[in-house]
Amino acid sequence: MSQVTIYLDAKTEARMRQAASAAGLSTSRWLAQLIQEKTSNEWPQAIREAAGAWADFPDLEELRREASDFPRESL
């Protein structure tokens, strides 16, 4: 595990400490989780679990039928 030094102004540091405390984490763990979240290339678990949650969401063919009257954007 490596160490990183960051420089924060006093207000930012106070907000970071407050957020870490509210999450029940050390500032180091809070920052590590934030960096992991922001650099992840996968959808969060909550988003993956939401797939298919809307039973009334139109399927692809229905979306295409309804969108046929919309003008296309020119590239």
Image: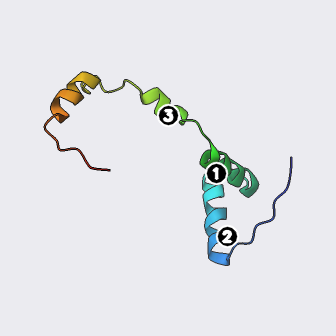
- Measured Cα–Cα span from mark 2 to mark 3: 29 Å
Q: Earlier in the sequence, mark 2 or mark 3?
A: 2
User: On residue 46, which mark appears?
Assistant: 3
Q: Nearer the viewer, residue 62 or 69?
A: 69
Residue 24 can be seen in this image:
no
- Measured Cα–Cα span from mark 3 to mark 1: 16 Å
Which residue is located at x 67 percent, y 77 percent? 10
Q: Residue 66 at what x, y percent from top left?
A: 16, 32
Q: Residue 41 at what x, y percent from top left?
A: 60, 39
Q: Residue 57 at what x, y percent from top left?
A: 26, 27
- Measured Cα–Cα span from mark 2 to mark 1: 15 Å
Secondary structure under the numbered disc 1 in the rendered image = helix
Question: Which amino acid type is shown beneath numbered disc 3?
Answer: Ala
Question: Which amino acid type is shown beneath numbered disc 2?
Answer: Glu
| Viewer-side label of 2, 3 | 3
Q: Are marks 3 and 1 in contact (CB under 8 Å)?
A: no
Q: Residues within 10 Å of mark 2 (few under 14, many from 20)?
A: few
User: On residue 66, which mark appears?
Assistant: none
Q: Residues within 10 Å of mark 1 (few under 14, many from 20)?
A: few
Q: Which residue is mark 1?
A: 34
Q: Nearer the viewer, residue 74 or 31?
A: 74
Q: Residues within 10 Å of mark 3 (few under 14, many from 20)?
A: few
Residue furthest to the front in view is: 75
Q: Earlier in the sequence, mark 3 or mark 1?
A: 1
| Viewer-side label of 2, 1 | 1
Image label count? 3
Q: Which residue is mark 2?
A: 13
Which residue is located at x 81 percent, y 59 percent? 4
Question: Which amino acid type is shown beneath numbered disc 1?
Answer: Leu
